[in-house]
Amino acid sequence: MLNIDVIKRGIVIDHIKVGGAMKIYNYLNLEHLDCSVAIIKNARSNKMGRKDIIKIEGMLDEIDLDILGAIDPNITINIIENGEIIEKKNPRLPEYVENILKCKNPRCITSVEHGIPHSFKLTDKKNGIYRCIYCEQAFDGVPSVVSGTVNKL
């Protein structure tokens, strides 16, 4: 059986869809932070069957957790202090994201012109559908841009 030590202070990102941990690792730019990170892939879960988990020791202030709602709105974020969970968060779908999702329309200005941000607005909260603000193309698939920002409109 796999054993990962308890963290004293940090974040546990739980209930990640299987295969999603590395995407979240890249989006959060964890490779650039000076902290310990444990990625557990394909762990057993009563709720999901299988899941991924990320444990991050320290660095609570340097991680932008708001983008996680656009990547996987079903995850749970546990804030850890003194080895105990002090807060549980479930990210919401942000109203607007920039350079998180990538427009797949080959005729979109973001595909033709370099340097134009990939900007999406949440148009269907119930189904989690985002649309490109330039061409109205619905986002369909797995987020594919490495970093970005989340804004509220």
Image (cartoon, rainbow, N blue to C red):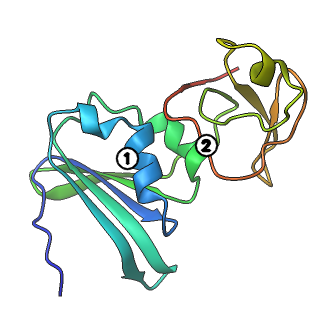
Tag of residue 12: none
Identified at 45% across, 85% down, the residue is: 46
Q: Indicate which label's residue lies in the foreground, 2 or 1.
A: 1
Q: Against 108, is 60 above or below?
A: below
Residue 89 shows in the view: no
Q: Residue at x 39, y 62 (%)?
A: 14
The answer to whether residue 121 is above or below residue 142 is above
User: Along the line of sight, which residue is nearer the eye, 118 or 64?
Assistant: 118
Residue 92 to residue 98: above or below: below
Which residue is tagged 2?
70
Of marks 2 and 1, which one's residue comes earlier in the chain? 1
**Residue beneath disc 1:** 25
The quarter holding residue 127 reads bottom right
The secondary element bearing badge 2 is classed as helix
In the image, 43 versus 105, the foreground residue is 105
* Neighbourhood count class around disc 2 (C-alpha, 10 Å): few under 14, some 14–19, many 20 upward: many
Query: Is residue 23 visible to the viewer in this orientation of the structure?
Result: yes
Residue at the spot 78% in from the left edge and 43% down from the top edge: 139
Task: Classify 10 Å Cα crowding around label 1: few (below 14), some (14-19), many (20 and above).
Answer: some
Give residue 29's position: percent from left, percent from top: 35, 35
Picture quarter with the N terminus: bottom left
Q: Amino acid at mark 2?
A: Ala
Q: In the rendered view, does 14 fall on the left or right side of 114?
A: left
Residue type at tag 1? Tyr
Asked if residue 152 is positioned above or below residue 27 in the image, the reply reads: above
State the image coordinates of residue 33 (x, y, percent, origin top left).
22, 32
